[in-house]
Amino acid sequence: MKFSVFNYEKTLDNNVIIFNTLTRSIISIERGEYYQLKENIKKINYHTAKKKYKDLCELGFIVDDDIDEFLLYKYWLNKQKWQNEYFIVTFLTTYNCNFKCPYCYEGFKKEKNYKNMELDKMLQFLENVIIKSRCRVIDFNFFGGEPLLEMKTIEKVCMFLCYIENNFEIRSLVNIVTNGYLIDEKMIENFKKLNINSFQITIDGIERCHDERRFLHDGSGTFKKIYNNLLMLIDNGFEIVINMNFDKYNYRSIIKFLDIFPEKYRNKVYIKFNSLIRTENNISRVHKLKPDELAIIYKTLLKSLKIYGYNKENAEFIGYGPCLANRKNSIIIEPNGNISKCIYGIGSDKFIIGNIKDDTDMILLKLYSYDEDEIEYEERCKTCTFLPFCMGGCKREKIENKYDINKVLCKKEEIQNGIVEGIIQLCT
Amino acid sequence: MLSKYVIKIPVDDKETLLYNSITNSLISFPTSKEDVEIFIKKLNQEELQYLRKELYLQFREIDEEKLVKMVMNKIKYSSRSVSFIIHLNYNCNLRCVYCYQREIKSKKVMTEETEKDVIKFIKEIVKKTSPEQIELCFIGGEPLLHKRKIKNIINGISNEGKSLKIIKSIITNGTLLNKKTVNELINMKIDLLQVTLDGPQKIHDQLRIGMDNSGSYNKIINNLEAISEFNESINIVINCNINLLNINHIEELFIELRKKRINYPVFFSIVFESRKNSFKYAYKNDINKAWLNAHKIGLKYGNNYVPFYRNSYFTCSFFRDNVFIISPDGYLYKCISGIGNTQYLISHISEYGSHYYYSRVSQFIEKENMNSECTDCDYKIICGGWCVYKKNVYGNICPKQELDENDIPLIVENYKNNAKGNK
């Protein structure tokens, strides 16, 4: 046997912590025992390992000698890219928004004279595509702009999802990504009727900081209302993800929020930290973080989750596996009916693969052929511990920075110092 | 411009076949091979649309390299249909001289416990991947020595998924297909039996020998005759293993079958040399035109052959995540010819889903099987880099010449044969 190349080791007091970047498992071994194992590992065969080192085997920390883990990584990645149990739909209900966040990557100077597609046509298209994909679950996400501005649309889509479940035995998981401002008790009752499962709400710190970054068109703050709505949603049993967009100016306020958030709710929510995305729409309004700055902030944020007693499971959601663009059974539908692959590239035709009016078979062909560019991994990548996080780098980022999409965009240091070290902080 | 994966095959100087290697569809153009592109340019929109539908053609809307990669990856990971090739045993009532399992000394038989493991395994896969259909193929040794096991496994999984289609087939030497057994198989709703006949009696009996050194031909023919005569509702195909001994006697087999009014479809396989195989009539690397010639005779006697049905990336188990080959002792292998050979061993079925299983299966499915010469090859999707088992025996080989001399002309012959029949 041999140790997996995806093992990240860290010595902590008298123990060695190993985090495996592929399986996301973490284990702690007494130092002496670990170094002894390291010396003898070559002599151990699979059957011995299975008995004596069951956990190390099952969690992927040790593998058979002849395993080329680069092939294992590719298999792991491709299985997820091609999975068709879930068909993921991100539906931009509208570009309109009641907020005017300066950092919004969708830009609030967008043309408003695009023609909205007919909802019925979209639903017909969806029905065709979903059935042809042979999925078992629709992972449906209302997005925008602010989707709650279009409740009628949401209602109609939810009825459609009900129809799909009754006629084709394909169930749905329904999520709404919202700024959370427009929610009230009546709406919550409606959400229950419509079988909405979860919400993702953005909070950028405690009141003062949040209100500087997320405000209405007239500039007034939004924190108080959102916070109350958030607690109401949790009390009503919805699954909640709190999305927190950070840069170097608000991360401390984010940590303060984690501190003031009621303890009884801390294991009822998932926290997602998102470094502000810079696109051509917001590039002048978003400060570019240096890689090492980003890493330290991210690690600090993850550490705070541990300090304030948030769920360790938050670690599972950190960039696991391919993004939506790289998953075959995932589409983004824009208000004009265009079908896109990249959520941060919406509006840009570089990521558009067609329109709901197109022939279904052709759309599926284009959908499945998207991202068949083969990344030319360098030799050093094939044994890199951080490959399962890197996966060659973000295609959109490469395009925007005029980088070759077939080459690896290496972010080893950020991944190690920000993500991996942060996860270890959270989980130990 | 036509896509690269559409292969132009000339019938004569007035007719060309266009074969779409992705969808396996064929269309005839009333023009010479050189003039195909000119002909397409002259088509109107409606005709182009028709072509698009018929041949699933697309004209450069999707980057072709991406399309080809996509198709090859979809075959690897798609779980619309999952296949289980279940070896019930290695023991057999015959001792065929070329049997690739001769090297396996220990003639294991699947235990009851392994039967249960297999049922559990199949159920787990069905639950996990929700396929539209599963294929169960029972093989041995001679699987009909253990009919009870076939019954147990089929019964064990028959309740899985109301809308799940289960296709059941058995590969058998045919000697045990007496009336009683055939009835049992019909009750089990077996969809297909594959029976081997290697030529007319005098040839077949030199190759497929019984335990007492007798032949097996008469027994098999009598069984097939009875099944045919009583019009039993079970599908049968005949398989003929082509080798240097029988290649010039194929027609005699068809004549004998016709005499006995045995009209089942006849397919072929090639017996090629494996490293330890000491069968002197095995083909070595070069099969010359044996494949084409054997099938031409099959065509003459009313058969129809799907292009590349035996040898293609589409049908091979090695690169597919959804094909499971199980040995009698419950181990998973990635190649039928390599059953029992540790080079093709993944893990025990009870280890399916473990990290160990994934680490092992990934070594096969993600294996780099093509080289730089393959990039521009017309047969890329069909070949996929070619059979790993054969390459392990012969070293790196390119099948281009073999395909050019056998499978491609066979497409034309098959087409002409159908055209004759379709009046």
Image (cartoon, grey):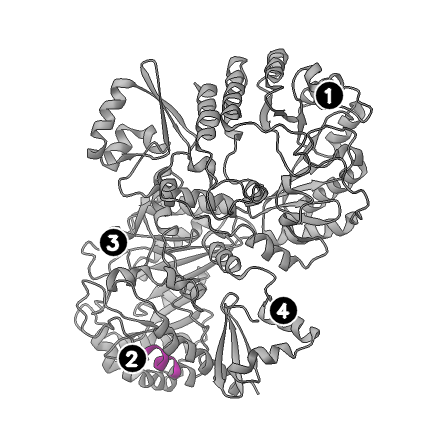
Q: Position of residue A162 (x, y in %)?
A: 71, 42
Q: Is residue B136 left or right of residue B38?
A: left
Q: Earlier in the sequence, mark 4 or mark 2?
A: 4
Q: Position of residue B76 (x, y in %)?
A: 45, 54
Which residue matches tag 4?
Answer: B53
Which residue matches tag 1?
Answer: A226
Neighbourhood count class around disc 4 (C-alpha, 10 Å): few under 14, some 14–19, many 20 upward: few
Which residue matches tag 3?
Answer: B341
Residue in the foreground of this view, choosing between B63 and B187: B63
Which residue matches tag 2?
Answer: B199
Q: Which residues are magenta?
A: B289-296
- Kindly indicate whether the residue at mark 3 contacts the one at mark 1 (C-beta within 8 angstroms): no
The stretch drawn in magenta includes residue A200:
no
User: Does the rendering let one see residue B421?
Assistant: yes
Establish if A40 lies above or below B296.
above
Residue in the foreground of this view, choosing between A226 and A412: A412
Label 4: element kind: helix
